[in-house]
Amino acid sequence: MRVIAKKILREFWKIYNDSEEPLKTWYKEASKATWNDPSEIKADYTKVSILKKSRVIFNICDNKYRLIVEINYKRQWVFIRFIGTHKDYDNIDANKILKLCI
């Protein structure tokens, strides 16, 4: 998968230092993955939440942070739609968020 864009993750872990290693690990694993459908993601990450419109929510740092991505399975692209604290996540609609805010 091609993850677009790592810069967003870097900016986040500069603010929340404890997220750096987990986000680097997620990025490395996602970049090597070849997910073709949500069930393959669920096989790798049992605690993800699968939403409509090809969106997936990953728990980072034992659910302290939330990462929402939108996946184009055909092109093997992962678009970061949201990264934030669990509290920030509670204030958004994960199905509708269009652009990232840190």
Image (spheres, rainbow, N blue to C red):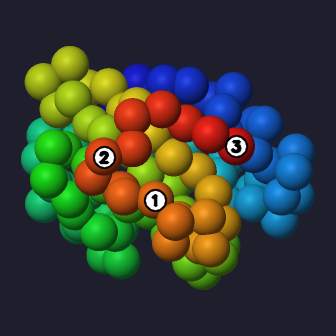
The reply to whether the C-beta atoms of the residues labelled 3 and 1 are less than 8 Å apart is no
Horizontal arrangement in the rendering, residue 95 relative to residue 97 (left or right): left
Q: CA distance from mark 3 to mark 1?
A: 13 Å
Residue at label 2?
96
Give the mark nearest the N terminus, 3 or 1: 1
Q: Is residue 76 above or below residue 90?
A: above
Q: CA distance from mark 2 to mark 3?
A: 16 Å
Residue at label 3?
102
Q: Amino acid at mark 2?
A: Lys
Query: Taking the image as drawn, is residue 32 in sight?
Result: no
The reply to whether the C-beta atoms of the residues labelled 2 and 1 are less than 8 Å apart is yes
Q: Amino acid at mark 3?
A: Ile
Disc 2 packing (10 Å; few <14; some 14–19; many ≥20)? few
Q: Secondary structure at mark 1?
A: loop
Q: Quadrant of residue 63?
A: bottom right
Query: Taking the image as drawn, is residue 3 in sight?
Result: yes
Horizontal arrangement in the rendering, residue 84 relative to residue 37 (left or right): right
Residue that appears at 83% across and 65% down? 18
Q: CA distance from mark 2 to mark 1?
A: 8 Å
Disc 3 packing (10 Å; few <14; some 14–19; many ≥20)? few
Residue that appears at 56% across and 25% down? 5
Q: Amino acid at mark 1?
A: Ile
Rendering coords of residue 74 (x, y %):
12, 24
Kindly identify which numbered label has been placed on residue 92: 1
Horizontal arrangement in the rendering, residue 63 relative to residue 41 (left or right): right
Q: Quadrant of residue 53?
A: top left
Q: Nearer the viewer, mark 3 or mark 1?
A: 1
